[in-house]
Amino acid sequence: MSQLRRLQFGLRAVLVVTTVAAVASWVYWIGWDRWQWHLQKQDLLEQVTQLKLGEPMTADWRPTIAGSPPPFIISGSGYSQEGIYFKHVACRWPDELYVVVIRYEDSRSAGIEVFASPSAPKGYAAKTLRGQLDAENRAKWSDEKFRAAALASHGIPYVAEPEGSDSPGQTGYWSDFIELVTGNAKEEMGFEYRRIYAAPTKASDD
């Protein structure tokens, strides 16, 4: 009987150790990364909330996000179909894409929003003209011979692309989503996205 109890206790101990090891492994290899992404996204939102409506247009705003590795960030500007000037900053994590959009009227910020969308699905084909052009250019740049020639024409030594660089489909997805949230896309193109922040207006402050 005592031997049976020892065997049962031994099996329980093995089960507990195995479970703890599995959880620890998940936290280390998967959970820790997701926790880091969560903290970085919160850091981005905290920096965005420091921006105020009515501020004069200055040099391009760009967040400084700590953590390793940091998200991939691109920024740009343009005009919406209604003729409203805007600046955008897009931050890409492995699981999501955040886009900060700052709209201006009379050279002062009139709208600040943050949108989020899941990462690009595999095999995504760009739908907007800008997305298609950006995806095409990305495909060219992915070719080592083309990149080497382009760099050499500017007197720049050849540099291999960093690991994890965007595919043409990912680049097209970025551009399509930016076109959507800045008002330059005629339809939503099947995007699943949400607005996670909008700067309070004067009316809501009163």
Image (cartoon, rainbow, N blue to C red):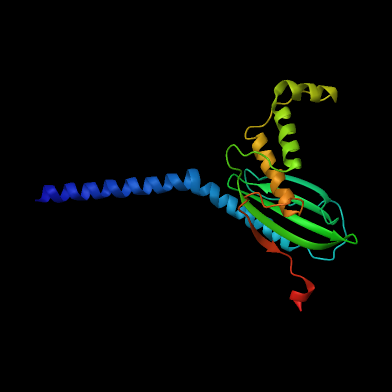
Residue at image point 12% right, 47% down = 3
Residue 55 against residue 163 in the figure, above or below: below
In the picture provided, is 8 more to the left or to the right than 45?
left
In the picture provided, is 165 more to the left or to the right than 7?
right
Quarter of the picture containing the C terminus is bottom right
Residue 150 against residue 62 in the figure, above or below: above
Whole-percent x, y for residue 154 in the image: 85, 25
Whole-percent x, y for residue 14 in the image: 28, 45
Whole-percent x, y for residue 168 in the image: 67, 34
> Could you tell me if residue 62 is visible in this image?
no
Residue at image point 84% right, 66% down = 54
Residue at image point 71% right, 23% down = 144
Say which of 176 and 96 sits in front. 176
Say which of 123 and 27 sits in front. 123
Say which of 54 and 62 sits in front. 54
Residue 10 against residue 201 in the figure, above or below: above
In the picture provided, is 18 more to the left or to the right than 61?
left
Residue at image point 74% right, 75% down = 204
Residue 168 against residue 83 in the figure, above or below: above
> Which picture quadrant has residue 41?
bottom right
